[in-house]
Amino acid sequence: MAEVDSTSPLLIKRYASRRLYNTETSDYVTLEDIARFIRAGRQVQIVDLKSGDDLTRQYLLQIIAEHEGRGENVLPIEVLTDLVRSYTTQAQSVVPQFLAASFEMLREGQSKMMENMTTFPNPMASMPGFEALRRQQQMFLKAMASGWGAGSTGPGMEPDDDTPARPRAAGDDMDEIRRQLAELQKRVSKL
C-alpha cells in the first residue's frame, strides 16, 4: 500500500445513496471513521460526487451533534443557545472571528501547559497512563489546530463604517460567551 501524505486533506466522496467513500483506501466509511481521522490529526474534505459541493461543514456538525446526543457533552447548553442566537442577531458577523480567536487562545494555553509538563519535573509523570494522556492531548491540539485557522476573514468579518452599532443585548451575549470561555479555560488548566 502506498504511503499517504497526511498534510493533504483526506478526500471523502458522498454518493447519491449518501454513502461516504474514502478515496485513499477505496472503501466506504462511517461518520465515526471520519471522526477518528480527525482525532488523529488528519484534515478531511467531504464533497458531493455529483454536484462537487463541499459538504465538510455539514458532516462535521453532524458528528458533533451525534457525540452531544450520546451524552458526550463538550458544549454547555448556554454556549449552544448563544450560537443559535448568533444566527439571528447582528452578532453573527463577529462570532466566527471570536470563536477562532478563543480556540487559538485555548490551544496556546494547552500547548504551554503540555510544554511545562514535559519540560519541568512533574510528579504526575510517574502516574500510570500519564504518557498516553499527554499523547492524546497533543493529538487533540493538533486536530484543533488544523480545524481552526487563525486570522479568518471574509464577508462580514471586518467592521464597516456603514454598519449600525450593535444593540446592547448582543454585547451581553458576547460577555456571557467570554465568561463561559474563561470558565472552560480554568477547567482545562486544572486538568
Image (cartoon, grey):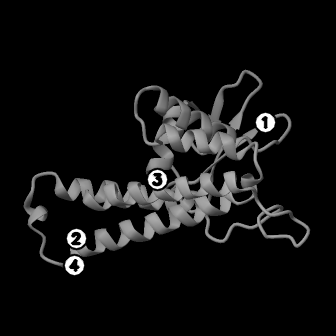
Residue 5 visible somewhere in the drawing: no
Q: In the rendered image, which residue does mark 1 sit on?
A: 49
Query: Which numbered disc, 3 or 1, marks the residue closer to the eye?
Result: 3
Residue 180: give its label: 3
Q: Which of marks 3 and 1 is nearer the N terminus?
A: 1
| Residue at the image point whose x is 78% and y is 69% from the top | 158
Residue 49 coordinates in the image, percent (x, y) = 78, 36
Q: Is mark 2 on a helix, strand or loop?
A: helix
| Left or right: residue 159 compared with residue 26 | right
Residue at horizontal 66 percent and vertical 39 percent from the top: 84
Three-letter code, disc 4: Thr
Residues at circles 4 and 3 in contact by the CB criterion of under 8 Å = no
Please tell me which residue is depicted at 40% across the width and 34% down the height of the picture: 72
Whether residues under marks 4 and 2 lie with C-beta atoms below 8 angstroms apart, the answer is yes
Q: How many labels does the image show?
A: 4
Residue named by callout 2:
117
Q: What residue type is labelled 2?
A: Met
Look at the picture and state if 110 lies above or below 79: below
Depicted 120 relative to depicted 113: above or below: below
On the picture, is 57 further left or further right than 80? Answer: right
Name the front one of labels 4 and 1: 4
- The residue wearing badge 4 is 119
Q: Distance between the residues labelled 4 and 3?
A: 30 Å
Circle 3: residue type? Gln
Helix, strand or loop status at disc 3: helix
Q: Viewer-proximal residue, 163 or 10?
A: 163
Kind of residue indicated by mark 1: Leu
Relative placement, left or right, of 22 versus 140 is right
Crowdedness near tag 3: few (<14), some (14–19) or many (≥20) residues, C-alpha within 10 Å: some
